Image: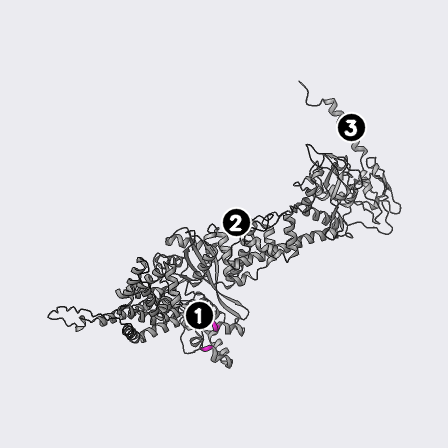
C-alpha cells in the first residue's frame, strides 16, 4: 500500500529548510520604509534591559538592531538633533536577500516590534497572487502604504488563455492594457487603480477586495480571474457591485488615515458620485410616474410588458409613460436604449416587483406622516366601516380623526390609514381586529376619545357590540353612531310606515327597472325628457331624493313615453310593463306621496350633504339636526296639505279619476266614545297615512339623535357664548381626569379678559363654535395661558359624527380594485388607496428618503 504520510526524516528536512529561508528573509520589509518622503520612521521599543545604559549622558552607545517592520504611534516626525534611521535603498529584486543591520541610537529607541508579520516573511508582496490569506492588519497597512501601482504590472506581458471547447471567435483570448482604463462619457479614460495583475497566477485581481476580503467576487479569490473572454461584462459588474465599492472606500479611508497629506482618488470618487446621481435621477422619474398613476387611480400593468420588444403592443400605463417621457428626457432615453440594445445593465427598476416596492415605500411614508401627526395631537377618534370588493372579500376601511395644530393653523383632519380584511363578522373578532390595528400603528388606545361606526348591531350594540368592548378597555372612548346612517334609517322607516308609501317607492324602482332593461326604452325616455330615471336604494343617502325629484319635474313627459311604449309595434313585454306602470302612476295615492316626498326629501338631503363634511363638529351637527327637526314639526300640516293639493291639481289636469273609498262602518259598543272618524273617506285615509309617515320620521330623529344631543349638551360649555359668559356654570364632572378643575376656572377668567381686551375680536368669536375659539387662541399665541381649555376643545373636536370618510374611501376602492385588477394584493390596494386619498401629503413626499429606504431594504446591485 502506498504511503500517504511523509517520513519523519523528510518532514524534519522540510522544516529545517523553512527555518533557514525564514532566517534569510528576516528584516526584508524594512526596504519599504525609505527616507525619500522626508519623514523618518521613529522606532518604538520593547527591548530588554540591555538596550539602554543609564550612565551614558554625553556619549551615545549604538546597538545593532535587526531591520524590522516599524510603525510610529504618533506619526512620522523629524526633530532637530535627533539621530535618524538610515534605511538603505533596496531594489525590488533583492526582496528575498538578508536584511542589512541599521545603526540606531539607543536614546531614540522607544519601542521595537521584535518581528515582522509571520505571513509576510516568505511571500513576494509585489505579486498579488502570493499575498497571505487571511491577512493581518499589519500586512494590510503595509500594502496600503505601498499603493497599488507597484503590484499592478500594467506594462508586463500578459498570458494568453486558451478557451476550452469550440468557439466561432477563436479559442485563444488575450488581455490588453486597455482593460486597465475605464472610458468616461466625455471620451476621457480613468485608470482602474483597483485592477492588478499577478504574473505568477496569470490572473487579474482587485486590490481593495483582496485587502479587505470581499469573498463574493472572483477578483478576490485565490485563483483570481483569467477568463479573458468574459472581461465584458465581468469588470463592469464587479466595479459597480456594492461589495467592491465598500472595499474601495475602506482602502481610501485607510490610506487617508495613514498619509494625511493624501486625498481620496478624486476621479474615482467623481465616477461613483456620477453613477449614484444618475441612478437617483432615474428613480426620481419612476417615482413621479408611480405617484401620478396612483393619484389618477390608473392600472400599472399591461398584457405584455416586454421592454426590449417593439412599440406596437400596449405594455401598460407604467411602461408606456416611461417610454413617453423618454422621448423628451435624455436620461430615460439612454436607460431604455441600453436595455433594448441588450447591453448588460445591472438593474432596470421597471419590473412589477420593483413597482410594488416603490408603492409600498410611498404609501408607508404617507402613513407614517399621518401617524406622527396623530401622536403629536395625542387624542384621536377611530372610524371604521366595511364593504365587499370586486373579489367578494370584505374590506374594512380605517380612518382616524384628530386635531392638527401647526403654528396658527388649526384643522380637524380625518385621514385614511388602511384597508384590511377582517378575520370575522362577529363583534368579538371585529373588536380584536380594530384593537390589533390600532396597536400595530403605534397608537395608545388609552388616548382614544371617540368611536364612529354605522348602526349595525354588531358595531353599535350597547352590551356586546364593538363599541361596548372597546369602551370596556377605555371608558373615555365615546361612541357616536353615524348621523348620516341614522338620518337615512329615519327616512327608510318613515317610507315603510304605510302601504301606499311602500307602493310608491316600489313603483319608482319598477320604473327604473323597466327603462334600464332595454336600451331602446332608455333612449326613448332620454330623447323625450332629457334625463334618465334614477334608482331607489336604501343605503345610498341621496338616491331617493334624486329619483323623486326627476319624476316630479318630468312626470307628464314620463307618462307620454310610457303611452308610446304601449303601441302595438312594441313587444308584448314592453307593452305589458308600460301599461302596468301607467296604471300605477295615474292614481291619486301615487301622486299624493309624490308631492309629499318631493317636499320632504330635499330638506333631508340638504342635511345629509351638510353632515358629510370633513371635520364637522358635534355642536354644528346638532344645530343642523335640530333645525331640520324644527322645520319638519312646524311644516307638518302645510307639507301634507300641499301634497293633497298637488295630487288633486294633477289629477284634474290629466283627467285621472279620484276613486272613492267605500266607508266601512263599525258597530259601536254601548260605552264606546270613539269619534266618527272611524269611517274615513278615501282622502281622509290617505291624509292619515301621510301624517303617519311624517310623524314617523320626526319620531325616529328624536330617538336616534338623542345620544349626540347628550354629548353636545355635555360639552356645551366649550362654545364661546357659554365659556365667555361669567354667569354660566361649567359642568366638568366627566372630564376631571384630563384636566385640573381649579386651573380650568382660572384659565376661563383669563380667556374672558383676553377676549374683552380684543374688542375687534369679541363680537366675532362669541357667536362661533369651539373650532373658531381654538383658532383664536392659536392666533394670539395664548396656548401657554389656557392649556386646559385647549385640551378640552381638542377632545371635543376629535369626536366624529359620521363615517362619510370611510364611504368616500369605498369610492376609491371601486376605482382601484376593479374587474381587471381583481387579483390585487391587500398591501398594494391599501398603499395605492392612501396615495390616492391623501393626495396633499403624497404630493410632499421626500423622494430622497424613499430611495434611501429602498436601498436599505436589501443589498442592491447599484449604489444609491
Q: Nearer the viewer, residue 592 or 525?
A: 525
- Which residue, given by chain and number where applicable, does mark 1 sit on? 741
Q: CA distance from mark 3 to mark 2?
A: 73 Å
- Quarter of the image with the N terminus is top right
Left or right: 194 in relation to 557: right
- Helix, strand or loop at disc 2? loop
In the picture as drawn, the residue positioned furthest to the right comes out as 59
- Which residue, given by chain and number where applicable, does mark 2 sit on? 303
Tag nearer the camera, 3 or 2:
2
Q: Position of residue 85 (x, y in %)?
A: 85, 44
Name the quadrant containing residue 68.
top right
Q: Position of residue 736 (x, y in %)?
A: 42, 67
Rate crowding at label 3 as few (under 14), some (14 to 19) or many (20 or more) other CA atoms within 10 Å. few
Compare marks 3 and 2 and give the one earlier in the sequence: 3
- Helix, strand or loop at disc 3? helix
Q: CA distance from mark 1 to mark 3?
A: 95 Å
Amino acid at each position: 500500500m502506498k504511503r500517504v504520510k511523509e517520513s519523519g526524516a523528510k518532514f524534519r528536512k522540510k522544516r529545517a529548510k523553512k527555518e533557514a529561508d525564514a532566517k534569510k528573509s528576516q528584516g526584508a520589509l524594512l526596504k519599504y520604509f525609505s527616507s525619500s518622503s522626508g519623514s523618518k520612521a521613529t522606532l518604538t521599543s520593547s527591548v530588554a534591559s540591555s538596550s539602554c545604559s543609564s550612565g551614558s549622558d554625553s556619549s551615545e552607545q549604538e546597538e545593532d538592531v535587526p531591520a524590522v517592520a516599524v510603525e510610529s504611534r504618533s506619526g512620522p516626525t523629524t526633530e532637530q538633533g535627533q539621530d535618524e534611521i538610515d534605511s538603505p535603498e533596496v531594489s525590488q529584486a533583492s526582496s528575498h536577500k538578508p536584511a542589512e543591520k541599521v545603526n540606531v541610537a539607543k536614546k531614540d529607541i522607544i519601542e521595537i516590534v521584535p518581528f515582522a508579520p509571520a505571513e509576510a516573511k516568505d511571500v513576494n508582496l509585489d505579486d498579488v497572487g502570493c499575498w497571505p490569506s487571511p491577512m493581518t492588519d499589519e500586512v494590510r497597512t503595509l500594502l496600503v502604504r505601498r499603493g497599488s501601482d507597484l503590484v499592478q504590472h500594467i506594462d508586463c506581458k500578459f498570458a494568453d488563455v486558451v478557451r476550452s471547447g469550440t468557439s466561432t471567435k477563436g479559442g485563444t483570448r488575450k488581455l490588453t492594457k486597455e482593460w486597465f482604463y475605464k472610458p468616461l462619457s466625455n471620451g476621457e479614460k480613468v485608470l482602474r487603480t483597483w485592477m492588478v495583475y499577478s504574473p505568477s497566477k496569470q490572473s487579474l485581481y482587485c486590490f481593495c477586495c483582496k485587502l479587505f476580503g470581499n469573498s463574493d467576487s472572483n477578483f478576490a479569490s485565490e485563483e483570481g480571474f483569467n477568463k479573458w473572454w468574459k472581461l465584458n461584462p465581468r469588470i463592469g459588474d464587479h466595479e459597480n457591485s456594492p461589495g467592491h465599492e465598500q472595499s474601495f472606500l475602506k482602502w481610501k479611508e485607510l490610506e487617508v488615515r495613514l498619509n494625511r497629506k493624501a486625498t481620496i482618488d478624486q476621479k474615482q470618487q467623481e465616477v461613483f458620485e456620477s453613477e449614484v446621481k444618475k441612478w437617483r435621477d432615474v428613480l426620481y422619474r419612476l417615482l413621479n410616474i408611480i405617484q401620478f398613476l396612483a393619484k389618477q387611480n390608473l392600472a400599472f400593468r399591461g398584457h405584455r410588458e416586454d421592454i426590449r420588444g417593439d412599440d406596437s403592443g400596449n405594455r401598460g400605463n407604467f411602461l408606456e409613460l416611461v417610454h413617453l417621457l423618454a422621448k423628451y428626457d435624455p436620461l430615460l432615453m439612454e436607460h431604455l436604449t441600453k436595455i433594448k440594445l441588450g447591453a448588460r445593465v445591472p438593474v432596470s427598476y421597471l419590473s412589477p416587483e420593483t413597482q410594488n416596492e416603490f408603492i409600498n415605500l410611498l404609501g408607508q411614508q404617507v402613513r407614517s406622516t399621518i401617524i406622527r401627526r396623530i401622536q403629536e395631537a395625542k387624542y384621536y377618534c377611530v372610524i371604521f366601516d366595511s364593504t365587499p370588493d370586486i373579489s367578494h372579500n370584505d374590506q374594512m376601511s380605517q380612518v382616524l380623526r384628530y386635531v392638527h395644530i401647526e403654528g396658527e393653523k388649526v384643522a380637524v383632519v380625518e385621514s385614511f390609514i388602511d384597508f384590511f380584511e377582517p378575520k370575522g363578522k362577529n363583534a368579538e373578532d371585529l373588536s380584536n381586529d380594530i384593537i390589533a390595528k390600532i396597536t400595530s400603528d403605534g397608537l395608545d388606545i388609552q388616548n382614544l376619545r371617540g368611536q364612529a361606526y354605522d348602526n349595525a348591531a354588531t358595531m353599535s350594540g350597547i352590551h356586546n357590540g364593538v363599541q361596548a368592548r372597546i369602551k370596556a378597555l377605555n371608558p373615555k372612548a365615546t361612541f357616536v353612531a353615524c348621523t348620516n346612517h341614522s338620518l337615512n334609517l329615519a327616512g327608510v322607516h318613515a317610507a315603510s310606515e304605510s302601504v301606499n308609501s311602500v307602493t310608491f317607492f316600489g313603483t319608482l324602482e319598477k320604473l327604473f327597472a323597466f327603462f334600464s332593461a332595454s336600451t331602446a326604452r332608455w333612449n326613448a325616455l332620454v330623447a323625450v325628457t332629457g334625463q334618465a330615471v334614477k334608482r331607489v336604494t336604501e343605503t345610498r343617502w341621496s338616491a331617493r331624493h334624486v329619483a323623486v325629484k326627476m319624476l316630479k319635474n318630468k312626470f307628464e313627459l314620463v307618462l307620454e313615453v310610457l303611452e308610446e311604449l304601449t303601441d302595438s309595434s312594441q313587444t308584448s313585454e314592453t307593452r305589458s310593463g308600460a301599461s302596468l306602470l301607467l296604471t300605477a302612476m295615474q292614481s291619486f295615492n301615487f301622486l299624493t306621496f309624490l308631492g309629499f316626498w318631493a317636499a320632504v326629501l330635499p330638506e333631508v338631503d340638504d342635511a345629509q350633504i351638510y353632515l358629510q363634511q370633513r371635520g364637522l363638529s358635534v355642536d354644528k351637527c346638532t344645530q343642523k339636526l335640530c333645525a331640520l327637526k324644527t322645520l319638519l314639526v312646524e311644516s307638518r300640516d302645510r307639507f301634507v296639505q300641499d301634497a293633497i293639493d298637488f295630487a288633486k291639481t294633477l289629477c284634474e289636469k290629466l283627467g285621472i279619476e279620484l276613486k272613492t273609498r267605500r266607508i266601512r262602518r263599525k258597530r259601536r259598543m254601548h260605552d264606546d266614545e270613539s269619534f266618527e272618524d272611524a269611517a274615513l273617506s278615501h282622502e281622509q285615509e290617505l291624509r292619515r297615512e301621510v301624517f303617519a309617515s311624517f310623524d314617523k320620521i320626526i319620531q325616529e330623529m328624536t330617538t336616534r339623535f338623542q345620544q349626540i344631543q347628550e354629548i353636545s349638551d355635555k360639552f356645551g360649555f366649550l362654545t364661546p357664548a357659554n365659556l365667555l359668559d361669567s354667569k354660566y356654570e361649567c359642568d366638568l364632572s366627566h372630564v376631571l381626569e384630563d384636566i385640573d378643575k381649579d386651573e380650568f376656572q382660572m384659565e376661563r377668567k383669563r380667556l374672558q379678559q383676553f377676549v374683552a381686551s380684543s374688542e375687534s375680536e369679541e363680537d366675532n368669536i362669541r357667536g362661533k363654535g369651539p373650532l373658531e375659539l381654538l383658532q383664536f387662541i392659536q392666533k394670539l399665541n395664548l396656548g401657554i395661558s389656557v392649556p386646559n381649555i385647549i385640551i378640552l376643545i381638542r377632545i371635543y373636536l376629535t369626536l366624529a359624527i359620521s363615517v362619510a370618510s370611510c364611504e368616500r374611501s369605498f369610492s376609491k376602492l371601486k376605482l382601484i380594485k376593479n374587474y381587471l385588477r381583481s387579483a390585487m394584493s391587500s398591501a398594494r390596494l391599501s398603499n395605492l388607496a392612501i396615495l390616492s386619498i391623501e393626495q396633499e401629503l403624497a404630493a410632499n413626499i421626500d423622494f430622497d428618503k424613499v430611495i434611501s429606504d429602498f436601498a436599505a431594504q436589501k443589498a442592491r446591485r447599484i449604489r444609491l
